[in-house]
């Protein structure tokens, strides 16, 4: 049997991998056509990816958390020719694993590994469930670094992130259940206007690209702002409902949004009810490029960093798409 060429990139410090890495390495050793690369630092990953690009594998398997996946995808786009991009397989090796829930083998680490190794046992067929997704390139951070990701948020997302680190992930909880716990606590805080969660951030937005006419929103206090190229977030959440066909979805809820408790469940479903209107403070867009001007922090696939200043736009651009194989 002729096997496709496969390379696996593992981050051993990601949440789930800290417990499973030794077993994964032992299992992969039984497949001579699979090359396994363990990267202990971002520097090692940056040195590895150009070498992999030169060898042109058919499939690149990324075994890590949301941040590892995003960084690896960005490096693949930087080093592979657009017409020679490999198929990507995602394993949920991190803590939250929201990306894997949409385009990965499975959101459960144990289930994902089971499917992945059964796929290898069948000869790693390249047909099946293949999904295309773009990735967001983010320029304009305070430190000058270019970053890549598939989920970005600010406003209440930042307060929820702090709560997750201090009360949930620090206790060893991970996966979609942990994100659900954070969501419930954050929504309760927003409904009650608890100042630990209810801290609107003043943001100006400009959107264009991918056939979308330029749209702008003057600076306004945003209670919640999320952007993503994923179709499904954790627990099946799909919080975008704009009809335009563009790769980045963005939903913004203004501070003081009316009837929040009645509106928000339909926002999470991407199926707005009668309370979800622009007049009430709820808007959703799709675009190929989004410029945000604000001063503060944001979360990009679990990494928290600061904007440069309100005068310097944070530029979010869709790149790709990449093709993701979900082994059955």
Image: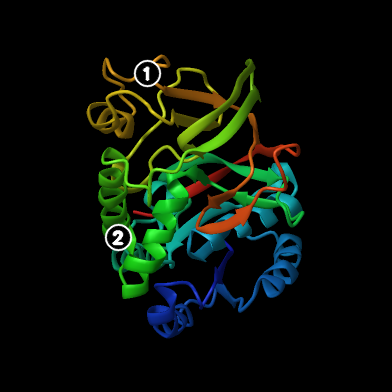
Q: Is residue 243 above or below residue 142?
A: above
For the question of whether residue 104 can be seen, the reply is no
Per the image, the residue denoted by label 2 is: 178
214 left or right of 115 in image: right
- Quadrant location of residue 23? bottom left
Q: Distance of mark 2 from mark 1, alpha carbons?
A: 30 Å
- Give the residue displayed 32% in from the left and 46% down from the top: 194
Mark 2 or 1, nearer chain start: 2
Q: Are marks 2 and 1 in contact (CB under 8 Å)?
A: no
**View extreme (front): residue:** 195
Q: Residues within 10 Å of mark 2 (few under 14, many from 20)?
A: some
Residue 205 sits in quarter: top right
What percent of the width, then of the height, locates residue 163?
Answer: 37, 60
Q: Which of 197 and 265 lies nearest the eye of the viewer?
A: 197
Q: Which quadrant: the C terminus? A: bottom left
Please indicate, yes or no, whether residue 154 appears anywhere in the rendered image: yes
Name the spot of residue 104 as percent of width and height, x first: 42, 53
**Residue 234 % position (x, y):** 34, 48
Residue at 30% across, 42% down: 236
Instruction: Give the tally of numbered discs.
Output: 2
17 lies left or right of 137: left
What secondary structure is marked by label 1?
Answer: loop
Near-viewer residue (90 or 273): 273
User: Residue at the spot x=27%, y=52% of the render?
Assistant: 185
| Residue 82 against residue 279 in the figure, above or below | below
22 or 118, nearer to the observer: 22
Which residue does the numbered mark 1 point to in the structure image?
A: 280
Mark 1 neighbour density, 10 Å: few (under 14) some (14–19) many (20 or more): some
Q: Nearer the viewer, residue 71 or 34?
A: 71
Q: How is the image coloured?
A: rainbow
Report whether 139 appears left or right of 275.
right
């Amino acid at each position: 049997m002729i096997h496709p060429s496969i390379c696996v990139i593992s981050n051993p410090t990601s949440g789930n991998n800290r417990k499973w890495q030794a077993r994964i390495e032992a299992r992969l050793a039984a497949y001579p056509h699979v090359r396994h690369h363990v990267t202990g630092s971002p520097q090692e990953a940056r040195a590895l990816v150009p070498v992999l690009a030169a060898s042109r594998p058919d499939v690149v398997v990324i075994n890590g958390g949301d941040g590892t996946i995003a960084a690896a995808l960005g490096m693949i786009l930087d080093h592979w020719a657009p017409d020679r991009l490999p198929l990507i397989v995602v394993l949920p090796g991190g803590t939250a694993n929201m990306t894997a829930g949409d385009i990965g083998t499975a959101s459960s680490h144990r289930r994902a590994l089971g499917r992945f190794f059964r796929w290898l046992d069948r000869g790693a067929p390249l047909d099946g469930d293949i999904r295309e997704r773009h990735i967001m390139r983010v320029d304009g951070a305070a430190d000058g670094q270019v970053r890549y990701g598939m989920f970005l948020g600010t406003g209440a997302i930042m307060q929820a992130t702090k709560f997750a680190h201090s009360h949930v992930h620090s206790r060893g909880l991970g996966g979609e259940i942990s994100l659900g716990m954070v969501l419930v606590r954050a929504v309760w805080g927003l409904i009650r206007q608890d100042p630990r969660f209810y801290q609107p951030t003043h943001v100006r937005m400009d959107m264009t690209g991918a056939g979308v006419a330029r749209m702008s929103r003057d600076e306004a206090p945003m209670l919640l702002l999320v952007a993503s190229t994923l179709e499904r977030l954790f627990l099946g959440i799909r919080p975008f409902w704009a009809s335009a066909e563009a790769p980045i979805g963005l939903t913004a809820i203004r501070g003081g949004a009316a009837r929040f408790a009645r509106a928000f469940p339909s926002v999470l479903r991407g199926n707005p009810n009668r309370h979800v209107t622009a007049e009430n403070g709820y808007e959703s867009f799709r675009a190929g490029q989004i410029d945000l001007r604000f001063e503060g922090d944001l979360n990009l696939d679990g990494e928290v960093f600061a904007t440069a200043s309100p005068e310097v736009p944070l530029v979010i651009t869709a790149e790709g798409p990449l093709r993701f194989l979900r082994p059955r």
